[in-house]
Every structure is written in structure tokens, then in C-alpha cells.
Amino acid sequence: MASKRRLRMTIYERDGVTVMNLGAVEIWDGADLSLLRDTLTRLIEQDGLDSIGVDMTHVKYIPSGFFGMLYDWHEHGIDMRLYTPQPNVAAMLWFRKFFEHEGDGSFVLHSEPLDGPQTGDWSDEDWSEQDDTVWESVGATSRR
């Protein structure tokens, strides 16, 4: 199965940024995250790249370690970008707080949280209400 995953990733350049694309995969799992991590490591350590993006056009769910992986590389001086995220990815708190829209579907990762939401129409108060709804829908006690 690993060989099929390797065959479906494409790497291309967009405005001076090397972009990884897993194709039309909507839900990334641990194997996808591993493939992304291994490819990032090769592109950075072996190829010497310092500006890398991930095409999120089709992605509706990502493993929790995805942001941490990008942030770790960012802390090592690598410019990390996401391209054309789906609305549910763009609505995630870490995305809204750490990625800034640069136009043309490009979002750049920052080390510090940005002031206010960067995508969508939610204010911080709206996010709290949304978050409580999600917690209640999975049977957890509301935090209010």
C-alpha cells in the first residue's frame, strides 16, 4: 500500500514555493501524514529547500499532528504555506490563529497567533459557541 501512496503525491513549484499535493484525498490518515513528513524531510534536508507548501484543495480532515509537524519545520526557519484549504480546515482554530491569507489561495504560517480570525466570518465569540456545540454533539459536558 505504501507504494500506491508514494505514486499519488505530486510535487510542483508555485510562485517560487515547492508544493506537495496528495491528490483528491479528502481524509488524511497516519500513513498520509508519514508520507508528508518523509517528503518534507527529504525536500528540506537533502534538497535544501526553505519554502514549502501543501495543497489542501481536497482535504476535509487532517490528523492532529499535521499542524505540529509544519510548526516544527517553521521554527527551524522553513517558510510553510497551505494552499486552497477547504472551509472546514480553514475554520480550525490553529489555522485561524496561525495562518495569514496572502491572496490567491495562499496562507502563510506565523510563529505567533494572529489577532482575530483570518478566514471565515466567525469572531472569537462565535468560535466559542461553535466549539461548545461540537463538544455537546459528542456527548461531552459543555464548558460554559
Image: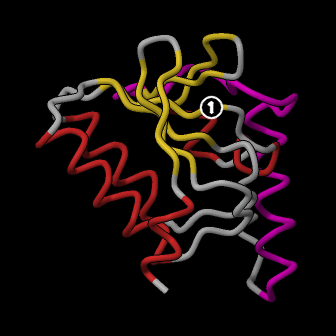
**Is 47 placed left or right of 38 in the picture?**
left
Q: Which residues are magenta?
A: 110-139
Report x, y in % for residue 86: 78, 44
Give the residue displayed 70% in from the left and 63% down from the top: 25
99 or 93, which lies in front? 99
Q: Position of residue 48 (x, y in %)?
A: 15, 30
Q: Judge from the rendering whether residue 144 lies leftward or rightward of residue 14; answer left or right.
A: right
Location of the C terminus by quadrant is bottom right
The reply, left or right, for residue 121 in relation to residue 75 is right
Between residues 31 and 73, which one lies in front from this camera angle?
Answer: 31
Residue 128 falls left or right of residue 6: right
User: Which residue: 55% across, 75% down?
Assistant: 29
Query: Residue 118 appears in which quarter of the rendering?
Result: top right
Against 109, residue 66 (above or below) is: below
100 or 121, nearer to the observer = 100
| x, y percent for residue 138 | 80, 84
Q: Residue at x 33, y 24 (%)?
A: 51
Badge 1 local density, few (<14 within 10 Å), some, or many (20+)?
A: many
Q: For numbered disc 1, what is the local secondary structure? A: strand
In the image, residue 21 sits, relative to residue 140, either above or below, namely above
Amino acid type, residue under disc 1 in the picture: Tyr
Q: Nearer the viewer, residue 124 or 6?
A: 6
Q: What residue is rendered at 56% in x and 61% in y?
A: 8
Residue 34: x and y, percent? Answer: 37, 69
Q: Is residue 17 magenta?
A: no
**On screen, residue 23 above or below 1:** above
Which residue is under mark 1?
83
